[in-house]
Amino acid sequence: MARAKQDYPQAKDRAALLRDEQRRKMTRSAHAYVRGSTLKFYEWLEESAGRIPDGPAVWICGDCHSGNLGPVASARGQVAVQIRDLDQTVIGNPAHDLIRLGLSLATAARGSNLPGVTTALMVKHMVEGYEAGLHGESLAPDEETTPKEVRRVLRQSLTRRWKHLARERIDNPKPSIPLGKRFWPLSNPERAAIDGLAADEGLRKLVTSLQHRPDDAVIEILDGAYWVKGCSSLGRLRYALLVAVANEAGGSETLLIDIKEATAAAAPRAAGADMPANDADRVVAGARALSPFLGRRMLAGALLGRAVVARELTPQDLKLDIEQLTRDEAVRAANYLALVVGRAHARQMDASTKAVWRKTLARNRSKTLDAPSWLWSAIVELIQSHEAAYLEHCRRYALQDSEA
Protein backbone atom coordinates (compact mmCIF):
# COMPACT_ATOMS: atom_id res chain seq x y z
CA MET A 1 0.00 0.00 0.00
CA ALA A 2 2.85 2.37 -0.81
CA ARG A 3 1.82 5.94 -1.58
CA ALA A 4 3.49 8.86 -3.25
CA LYS A 5 4.24 11.59 -0.73
CA GLN A 6 1.78 14.45 -0.99
CA ASP A 7 0.40 17.13 1.29
CA TYR A 8 -2.27 15.17 3.18
CA PRO A 9 -3.22 15.49 6.86
CA GLN A 10 -1.05 13.58 9.29
CA ALA A 11 -2.71 11.34 11.86
CA LYS A 12 -1.90 13.82 14.66
CA ASP A 13 -3.71 16.63 12.80
CA ARG A 14 -6.90 14.74 12.01
CA ALA A 15 -8.89 15.53 15.16
CA ALA A 16 -8.96 19.30 14.67
CA LEU A 17 -9.74 18.99 10.95
CA LEU A 18 -12.56 16.53 11.59
CA ARG A 19 -14.09 18.75 14.28
CA ASP A 20 -14.15 21.61 11.77
CA GLU A 21 -15.72 19.35 9.13
CA GLN A 22 -18.40 18.22 11.56
CA ARG A 23 -19.27 21.81 12.47
CA ARG A 24 -19.43 22.72 8.79
CA LYS A 25 -21.75 19.84 7.93
CA MET A 26 -24.10 20.81 10.76
CA THR A 27 -24.59 24.31 9.29
CA ARG A 28 -26.20 22.97 6.10
CA SER A 29 -29.74 22.83 7.51
CA ALA A 30 -31.69 22.29 10.71
CA HIS A 31 -32.22 18.71 9.52
CA ALA A 32 -28.44 18.22 9.19
CA TYR A 33 -27.97 19.74 12.64
CA VAL A 34 -30.43 17.25 14.14
CA ARG A 35 -28.51 14.38 12.55
CA GLY A 36 -25.22 15.58 14.00
CA SER A 37 -26.39 16.60 17.49
CA THR A 38 -27.35 13.31 19.09
CA LEU A 39 -26.02 14.34 22.51
CA LYS A 40 -28.50 17.24 22.63
CA PHE A 41 -31.31 14.76 22.04
CA TYR A 42 -30.12 12.52 24.88
CA GLU A 43 -29.86 15.52 27.19
CA TRP A 44 -33.51 16.30 26.45
CA LEU A 45 -34.49 12.70 27.19
CA GLU A 46 -32.77 12.91 30.57
CA GLU A 47 -34.58 16.13 31.42
CA SER A 48 -37.91 14.60 30.33
CA ALA A 49 -37.78 11.55 32.58
CA GLY A 50 -41.30 10.62 33.70
CA ARG A 51 -43.05 12.28 30.76
CA ILE A 52 -42.35 9.47 28.31
CA PRO A 53 -43.99 6.06 28.80
CA ASP A 54 -41.76 3.12 29.62
CA GLY A 55 -41.86 0.65 26.76
CA PRO A 56 -40.55 -2.91 26.90
CA ALA A 57 -36.76 -3.23 27.17
CA VAL A 58 -35.63 -4.21 23.67
CA TRP A 59 -32.72 -3.36 21.41
CA ILE A 60 -33.34 0.09 19.93
CA CYS A 61 -31.41 2.08 17.32
CA GLY A 62 -30.74 4.87 19.80
CA ASP A 63 -30.17 7.37 16.97
CA CYS A 64 -33.20 6.67 14.82
CA HIS A 65 -33.18 9.58 12.36
CA SER A 66 -34.33 9.12 8.77
CA GLY A 67 -30.78 9.03 7.36
CA ASN A 68 -30.07 5.93 9.42
CA LEU A 69 -32.63 3.88 7.51
CA GLY A 70 -32.31 2.59 3.97
CA PRO A 71 -31.98 -0.44 1.70
CA VAL A 72 -29.49 -3.07 2.87
CA ALA A 73 -28.62 -6.43 1.33
CA SER A 74 -28.59 -9.81 3.03
CA ALA A 75 -25.85 -12.39 2.64
CA ARG A 76 -28.07 -14.06 0.01
CA GLY A 77 -28.66 -10.92 -2.02
CA GLN A 78 -32.14 -10.00 -0.73
CA VAL A 79 -32.77 -6.28 -0.24
CA ALA A 80 -35.00 -4.59 2.33
CA VAL A 81 -35.24 -1.23 4.07
CA GLN A 82 -33.82 -1.62 7.56
CA ILE A 83 -31.96 0.42 10.17
CA ARG A 84 -28.45 0.84 8.78
CA ASP A 85 -26.44 2.61 11.51
CA LEU A 86 -26.26 1.06 14.96
CA ASP A 87 -23.51 3.05 16.69
CA GLN A 88 -25.85 4.05 19.51
CA THR A 89 -27.81 0.82 19.78
CA VAL A 90 -28.70 -0.22 23.33
CA ILE A 91 -31.36 -2.22 25.13
CA GLY A 92 -33.67 0.63 25.96
CA ASN A 93 -37.08 2.24 25.60
CA PRO A 94 -38.57 1.92 22.07
CA ALA A 95 -40.38 5.23 22.62
CA HIS A 96 -36.99 6.93 22.23
CA ASP A 97 -36.68 5.68 18.65
CA LEU A 98 -40.18 6.96 17.86
CA ILE A 99 -39.39 10.43 19.21
CA ARG A 100 -36.05 10.64 17.42
CA LEU A 101 -37.61 9.56 14.10
CA GLY A 102 -40.45 12.05 14.58
CA LEU A 103 -38.00 14.90 15.23
CA SER A 104 -35.99 13.98 12.13
CA LEU A 105 -39.05 13.83 9.88
CA ALA A 106 -40.48 17.05 11.32
CA THR A 107 -37.27 19.00 10.65
CA ALA A 108 -37.17 17.56 7.11
CA ALA A 109 -40.74 18.80 6.61
CA ARG A 110 -39.87 22.27 7.88
CA GLY A 111 -36.81 22.31 5.61
CA SER A 112 -39.17 21.55 2.73
CA ASN A 113 -41.31 24.61 3.65
CA LEU A 114 -44.27 22.41 4.51
CA PRO A 115 -46.87 23.84 6.92
CA GLY A 116 -47.35 22.69 10.49
CA VAL A 117 -50.50 20.83 9.46
CA THR A 118 -48.28 18.47 7.46
CA THR A 119 -46.11 17.83 10.52
CA ALA A 120 -49.23 16.95 12.52
CA LEU A 121 -50.34 14.54 9.79
CA MET A 122 -46.85 13.02 9.65
CA VAL A 123 -46.93 12.25 13.37
CA LYS A 124 -50.38 10.69 13.03
CA HIS A 125 -49.30 8.47 10.13
CA MET A 126 -46.01 7.68 11.81
CA VAL A 127 -47.85 6.20 14.78
CA GLU A 128 -50.15 4.25 12.45
CA GLY A 129 -47.13 2.85 10.61
CA TYR A 130 -45.34 1.93 13.84
CA GLU A 131 -48.42 0.13 15.17
CA ALA A 132 -48.76 -1.73 11.86
CA GLY A 133 -45.15 -2.83 12.28
CA LEU A 134 -45.92 -4.12 15.76
CA HIS A 135 -48.75 -6.16 14.24
CA GLY A 136 -46.21 -7.70 11.85
CA GLU A 137 -47.56 -6.20 8.65
CA SER A 138 -45.46 -6.77 5.53
CA LEU A 139 -42.66 -4.55 4.32
CA ALA A 140 -43.16 -5.71 0.72
CA PRO A 141 -42.50 -2.77 -1.62
CA ASP A 142 -45.97 -2.74 -3.20
CA GLU A 143 -47.21 0.22 -5.17
CA GLU A 144 -49.93 1.29 -2.74
CA THR A 145 -48.16 1.42 0.64
CA THR A 146 -44.55 2.16 -0.22
CA PRO A 147 -43.67 5.82 -0.90
CA LYS A 148 -42.48 6.39 -4.45
CA GLU A 149 -39.18 7.81 -3.22
CA VAL A 150 -38.57 4.56 -1.29
CA ARG A 151 -39.55 2.48 -4.33
CA ARG A 152 -37.14 4.52 -6.43
CA VAL A 153 -34.24 3.87 -4.05
CA LEU A 154 -35.14 0.18 -3.80
CA ARG A 155 -35.19 -0.16 -7.60
CA GLN A 156 -31.86 1.63 -7.78
CA SER A 157 -30.48 -0.65 -5.08
CA LEU A 158 -31.49 -3.82 -6.87
CA THR A 159 -29.71 -2.81 -10.09
CA ARG A 160 -26.44 -1.65 -8.56
CA ARG A 161 -23.13 -3.46 -9.11
CA TRP A 162 -19.53 -3.03 -7.94
CA LYS A 163 -18.81 -0.28 -10.48
CA HIS A 164 -21.60 1.82 -8.96
CA LEU A 165 -20.24 1.31 -5.46
CA ALA A 166 -16.72 2.16 -6.62
CA ARG A 167 -17.81 5.35 -8.34
CA GLU A 168 -19.90 6.44 -5.37
CA ARG A 169 -17.47 5.57 -2.59
CA ILE A 170 -14.02 5.84 -4.14
CA ASP A 171 -14.53 7.50 -7.54
CA ASN A 172 -12.39 4.78 -9.07
CA PRO A 173 -13.55 1.33 -10.29
CA LYS A 174 -9.94 0.10 -10.32
CA PRO A 175 -8.59 -1.61 -7.18
CA SER A 176 -7.11 1.43 -5.44
CA ILE A 177 -8.37 4.16 -3.14
CA PRO A 178 -7.61 7.67 -4.44
CA LEU A 179 -6.45 9.97 -1.65
CA GLY A 180 -8.13 13.35 -1.41
CA LYS A 181 -10.97 15.03 0.45
CA ARG A 182 -12.66 11.79 1.52
CA PHE A 183 -9.66 9.49 1.97
CA TRP A 184 -6.48 10.31 3.86
CA PRO A 185 -3.24 8.31 4.07
CA LEU A 186 -2.61 5.81 6.84
CA SER A 187 0.06 6.35 9.44
CA ASN A 188 2.78 3.70 9.67
CA PRO A 189 1.19 2.03 12.77
CA GLU A 190 -2.21 2.03 11.02
CA ARG A 191 -0.74 0.52 7.87
CA ALA A 192 0.97 -2.24 9.83
CA ALA A 193 -2.19 -3.03 11.81
CA ILE A 194 -4.35 -3.14 8.69
CA ASP A 195 -1.85 -5.28 6.77
CA GLY A 196 -2.05 -7.71 9.68
CA LEU A 197 -5.79 -8.13 9.12
CA ALA A 198 -5.06 -10.27 6.06
CA ALA A 199 -4.24 -13.11 8.46
CA ASP A 200 -7.30 -12.50 10.65
CA GLU A 201 -9.57 -15.56 10.52
CA GLY A 202 -12.63 -13.55 11.52
CA LEU A 203 -12.19 -11.10 8.66
CA ARG A 204 -11.70 -13.96 6.19
CA LYS A 205 -14.95 -15.57 7.36
CA LEU A 206 -16.72 -12.23 7.00
CA VAL A 207 -15.65 -11.67 3.38
CA THR A 208 -16.36 -15.28 2.39
CA SER A 209 -19.86 -15.28 3.92
CA LEU A 210 -21.41 -13.44 0.97
CA GLN A 211 -21.89 -14.41 -2.66
CA HIS A 212 -21.06 -18.12 -2.20
CA ARG A 213 -17.34 -17.54 -1.88
CA PRO A 214 -15.15 -20.52 -0.90
CA ASP A 215 -14.91 -20.87 2.88
CA ASP A 216 -11.15 -21.34 2.71
CA ALA A 217 -10.51 -18.50 0.25
CA VAL A 218 -7.36 -16.49 0.77
CA ILE A 219 -7.85 -12.76 1.15
CA GLU A 220 -5.41 -10.01 0.20
CA ILE A 221 -5.60 -6.40 1.34
CA LEU A 222 -4.98 -4.33 -1.79
CA ASP A 223 -5.28 -0.85 -0.36
CA GLY A 224 -6.46 1.09 2.66
CA ALA A 225 -7.09 4.66 3.77
CA TYR A 226 -8.54 6.69 6.60
CA TRP A 227 -12.15 7.47 5.66
CA VAL A 228 -13.60 10.92 6.32
CA LYS A 229 -17.22 9.88 6.62
CA GLY A 230 -20.36 10.58 8.64
CA CYS A 231 -21.26 13.52 10.83
CA SER A 232 -21.85 12.68 14.49
CA SER A 233 -19.21 9.92 14.23
CA LEU A 234 -16.49 12.12 12.69
CA GLY A 235 -13.30 11.81 14.70
CA ARG A 236 -13.53 8.10 15.43
CA LEU A 237 -11.25 5.61 13.74
CA ARG A 238 -12.74 4.92 10.30
CA TYR A 239 -11.03 3.03 7.50
CA ALA A 240 -11.86 1.86 3.99
CA LEU A 241 -10.14 -1.32 2.81
CA LEU A 242 -10.04 -2.84 -0.65
CA VAL A 243 -9.77 -6.61 -0.28
CA ALA A 244 -9.26 -9.23 -2.99
CA VAL A 245 -10.88 -12.65 -2.41
CA ALA A 246 -11.07 -15.75 -4.58
CA ASN A 247 -14.48 -16.71 -5.97
CA GLU A 248 -15.99 -20.05 -6.97
CA ALA A 249 -15.18 -19.44 -10.64
CA GLY A 250 -11.49 -19.57 -9.84
CA GLY A 251 -11.00 -15.85 -10.31
CA SER A 252 -10.79 -12.99 -7.86
CA GLU A 253 -13.09 -10.15 -6.92
CA THR A 254 -12.57 -6.89 -5.08
CA LEU A 255 -14.56 -5.95 -1.98
CA LEU A 256 -14.88 -2.72 -0.03
CA ILE A 257 -14.66 -3.19 3.74
CA ASP A 258 -15.73 -0.47 6.16
CA ILE A 259 -13.98 -0.53 9.56
CA LYS A 260 -15.45 1.81 12.17
CA GLU A 261 -14.53 2.43 15.77
CA ALA A 262 -17.20 1.45 18.30
CA THR A 263 -17.33 3.84 21.23
CA ALA A 264 -19.50 3.92 24.34
CA ALA A 265 -23.16 4.59 23.56
CA ALA A 266 -24.64 7.80 24.93
CA ALA A 267 -28.21 6.60 24.32
CA PRO A 268 -30.13 5.86 27.55
CA ARG A 269 -30.31 2.17 28.36
CA ALA A 270 -32.87 0.22 30.35
CA ALA A 271 -32.06 -0.34 34.00
CA GLY A 272 -30.36 -3.70 34.46
CA ALA A 273 -30.03 -4.26 30.71
CA ASP A 274 -27.79 -7.25 29.97
CA MET A 275 -25.62 -6.04 27.09
CA PRO A 276 -22.11 -6.94 25.95
CA ALA A 277 -19.47 -4.90 27.79
CA ASN A 278 -17.40 -4.55 24.63
CA ASP A 279 -18.81 -1.78 22.43
CA ALA A 280 -18.10 -3.58 19.16
CA ASP A 281 -19.94 -6.67 20.43
CA ARG A 282 -22.81 -4.39 21.53
CA VAL A 283 -23.13 -2.85 18.06
CA VAL A 284 -23.15 -6.26 16.36
CA ALA A 285 -25.68 -7.69 18.85
CA GLY A 286 -28.00 -4.73 18.34
CA ALA A 287 -27.66 -4.96 14.57
CA ARG A 288 -28.55 -8.64 14.54
CA ALA A 289 -31.66 -7.95 16.62
CA LEU A 290 -32.84 -4.88 14.71
CA SER A 291 -31.45 -5.34 11.19
CA PRO A 292 -30.73 -9.01 10.47
CA PHE A 293 -29.58 -8.37 6.89
CA LEU A 294 -26.90 -5.99 8.10
CA GLY A 295 -26.09 -7.67 11.40
CA ARG A 296 -25.07 -10.94 9.76
CA ARG A 297 -22.55 -9.02 7.63
CA MET A 298 -20.79 -7.41 10.59
CA LEU A 299 -17.80 -8.51 12.65
CA ALA A 300 -16.66 -7.21 16.03
CA GLY A 301 -12.92 -6.96 16.49
CA ALA A 302 -10.05 -4.78 17.64
CA LEU A 303 -7.56 -2.55 15.83
CA LEU A 304 -4.78 -0.53 17.43
CA GLY A 305 -6.17 -1.45 20.83
CA ARG A 306 -9.66 -0.08 20.12
CA ALA A 307 -12.96 -1.85 19.58
CA VAL A 308 -14.02 -1.75 15.92
CA VAL A 309 -16.78 -3.14 13.74
CA ALA A 310 -16.01 -4.36 10.22
CA ARG A 311 -18.59 -4.91 7.50
CA GLU A 312 -18.52 -5.52 3.81
CA LEU A 313 -20.26 -2.76 1.90
CA THR A 314 -22.46 -4.00 -0.92
CA PRO A 315 -23.65 -1.96 -3.91
CA GLN A 316 -27.22 -2.36 -2.62
CA ASP A 317 -26.54 -0.48 0.65
CA LEU A 318 -28.04 2.99 0.31
CA LYS A 319 -29.45 5.60 2.63
CA LEU A 320 -32.71 7.43 2.14
CA ASP A 321 -32.02 11.13 1.61
CA ILE A 322 -35.18 12.75 2.88
CA GLU A 323 -34.47 16.43 2.38
CA GLN A 324 -37.08 17.94 0.04
CA LEU A 325 -40.59 16.51 0.32
CA THR A 326 -44.08 17.28 -0.87
CA ARG A 327 -46.94 16.93 1.61
CA ASP A 328 -47.98 13.49 0.33
CA GLU A 329 -44.38 12.26 0.23
CA ALA A 330 -43.78 13.43 3.80
CA VAL A 331 -46.85 11.63 5.12
CA ARG A 332 -46.07 8.39 3.27
CA ALA A 333 -42.42 8.48 4.32
CA ALA A 334 -43.40 8.94 7.97
CA ASN A 335 -45.76 5.98 7.82
CA TYR A 336 -43.33 3.69 6.01
CA LEU A 337 -40.19 4.43 8.03
CA ALA A 338 -42.11 4.03 11.29
CA LEU A 339 -43.37 0.68 9.94
CA VAL A 340 -39.73 -0.38 9.46
CA VAL A 341 -38.88 0.63 13.04
CA GLY A 342 -42.00 -1.04 14.42
CA ARG A 343 -41.06 -4.31 12.74
CA ALA A 344 -37.52 -4.08 14.15
CA HIS A 345 -38.86 -3.63 17.68
CA ALA A 346 -41.63 -6.21 17.33
CA ARG A 347 -39.18 -8.88 16.21
CA GLN A 348 -37.89 -8.94 19.79
CA MET A 349 -41.26 -9.08 21.58
CA ASP A 350 -43.60 -11.95 22.32
CA ALA A 351 -47.34 -11.57 21.73
CA SER A 352 -48.24 -10.44 25.26
CA THR A 353 -45.43 -7.84 25.34
CA LYS A 354 -46.57 -6.41 22.02
CA ALA A 355 -50.17 -6.25 23.23
CA VAL A 356 -49.18 -4.30 26.36
CA TRP A 357 -47.00 -1.90 24.35
CA ARG A 358 -49.77 -1.29 21.81
CA LYS A 359 -52.16 -0.52 24.68
CA THR A 360 -49.66 1.94 26.13
CA LEU A 361 -49.37 3.68 22.76
CA ALA A 362 -53.16 3.90 22.52
CA ARG A 363 -53.40 6.00 25.70
CA ASN A 364 -53.61 9.80 25.77
CA ARG A 365 -54.87 10.08 22.21
CA SER A 366 -56.48 13.35 21.19
CA LYS A 367 -59.89 13.33 19.49
CA THR A 368 -58.50 15.66 16.84
CA LEU A 369 -55.03 14.07 16.40
CA ASP A 370 -54.71 10.30 16.46
CA ALA A 371 -51.28 10.27 18.10
CA PRO A 372 -50.18 10.09 21.74
CA SER A 373 -50.00 13.56 23.31
CA TRP A 374 -46.59 12.78 24.84
CA LEU A 375 -45.16 12.11 21.38
CA TRP A 376 -46.54 15.30 19.85
CA SER A 377 -45.37 17.40 22.82
CA ALA A 378 -41.89 15.82 22.67
CA ILE A 379 -41.50 16.57 18.96
CA VAL A 380 -42.69 20.18 19.38
CA GLU A 381 -40.29 20.81 22.26
CA LEU A 382 -37.39 19.22 20.43
CA ILE A 383 -38.03 21.23 17.24
CA GLN A 384 -37.99 24.43 19.28
CA SER A 385 -34.78 23.63 21.13
CA HIS A 386 -32.96 22.22 18.10
CA GLU A 387 -33.85 25.11 15.77
CA ALA A 388 -32.62 27.61 18.34
CA ALA A 389 -29.45 25.58 18.85
CA TYR A 390 -28.99 25.30 15.09
CA LEU A 391 -29.11 29.07 14.61
CA GLU A 392 -26.67 29.58 17.47
CA HIS A 393 -24.37 26.95 15.96
CA CYS A 394 -24.47 28.78 12.61
CA ARG A 395 -23.76 32.12 14.33
CA ARG A 396 -20.70 30.71 16.08
CA TYR A 397 -19.52 29.07 12.86
CA ALA A 398 -19.92 32.31 10.90
CA LEU A 399 -18.00 34.30 13.54
CA GLN A 400 -15.26 31.70 13.62
CA ASP A 401 -15.05 31.80 9.81
CA SER A 402 -14.86 35.60 9.72
CA GLU A 403 -12.08 35.66 12.32
CA ALA A 404 -9.99 32.99 10.54
Image (cartoon, rainbow, N blue to C red):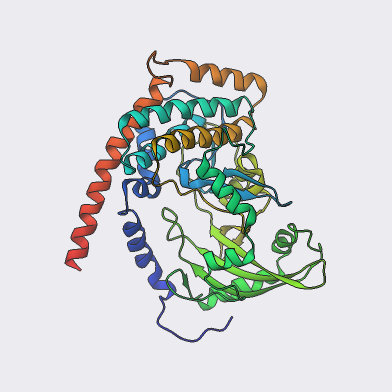
Whether residue 59 can be seen here: no
Vertical side of 201 occupied by 360: above or below: above
Q: In x, y percent, where is residue 134?
A: 59, 26
| Quarter occupied by residue 219 | bottom right
Residue nearer the viewer, 253 or 231: 253
Q: Is residue 60 left or right of residue 387?
A: right
> For the C terminus, which image quadrant?
bottom left
Residue 241 at what x, y percent from top left?
60, 69
Outermost residue to the bottom = 4
Q: Image height check: is 226 above or below 292?
A: below
Q: How many marks?
A: 0
Q: In which quarter of the image is residue 182?
A: bottom left
Residue 288 at x, y percent in the picture: 65, 44
- Residue at the spot x=64%, y=28% of the render? 136
Compared across the picture, whether 43 is left or right of 91 comes to left
Camera-side residue: 10 or 101? 101
In the foreground, 335 or 184: 335
Q: Residue drawn at (46%, 49%), measured in percent from left and top?
A: 321
Please tell me whether residue 59 is drawn above or below residue 208 in the rendered image: above
